[in-house]
Image (cartoon, rainbow, N blue to C red):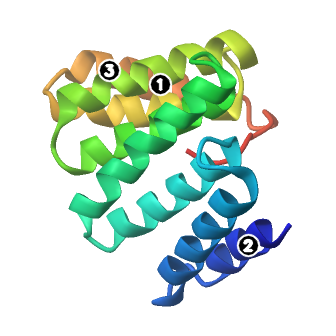
Amino acid sequence: MEAIFFHHQAEANCDTARPERSYRRALIICEQDLGPDHPEVAKSLRHLGECLRSEGKYAEAEPLLRRALGITEKSLGPDHLEAALSLNFLGYFYQSQKRSAEAEQLLRRALAIREKILGPDHRSVASSLSYLAECVAAQDNRAEAESLSSRARNTPPTAVRLGWR
């Protein structure tokens, strides 16, 4: 599929000005080929949203990340691993905006989904624990942040990693 090619092209050029254009093109192709509510569209939205966040285009990024979460929850269900990924992206966005209370709610949901499906010793769970630790530390909850960080650090090094974030 052409859209997948553009996802990979955008990721390969992540440090240049080109990924945004590639992600936008992938999104257009996905929407045209698969319809506006397909899980691949959500993936394109997440990538474009994260790209825009990293460029400081926060007003553009947030609605894309929110839409990605909505599509994922509607098409795959609110307890799907892809929903956890969308929750992490949006939670990380909110955390980067110093909106820690909003971020915490999403990051806790993502962690719960991953723990339920993958078990406590999975690398994706460790990733969720790390993001949540960062979030609660920003709210001066040092004890919980340390507990979460400790759990993340104690994830077995051989644990399988699923995706990123």
Which residue is at 52% across, 55% downward? 45
Left or right side of 156 for 133:
left
Identity, as a three-letter code, of the amino acid under mark 1: Ser
Report the quarter where the N terminus lies: bottom right
Identity, as a three-letter code, of the amino acid under mark 2: His
Left or right side of 86 for 64:
left
Left or right side of 14 for 156:
right
Residue found farthest to the right? 1
- The residue singled out by tag 2 in the image is 8
- The residue singled out by tag 3 in the image is 105
Figure check: 72 above or below 65: above
Q: Report helix, strand or loop for mark 1.
A: helix
C-alpha separation, residue under disc 3 versus residue under disc 2 = 31 Å
Mark nearest the camera among 2 and 1 is: 2
Q: Nearer the viewer, residue 100 or 31?
A: 31
How many neighbours does mark 1 have within 10 angstroms: few (below 14), some (14-19), or many (20 or more)?
some
- Name the spot of residue 53 as percent of width and height, x first: 34, 63
The numbered mark, 3 or 2, whose residue comes first in the sequence reads 2
- The residue singled out by tag 1 in the image is 150
Identity, as a three-letter code, of the amino acid under mark 3: Gln
Q: Report helix, strand or loop for mark 2.
A: helix
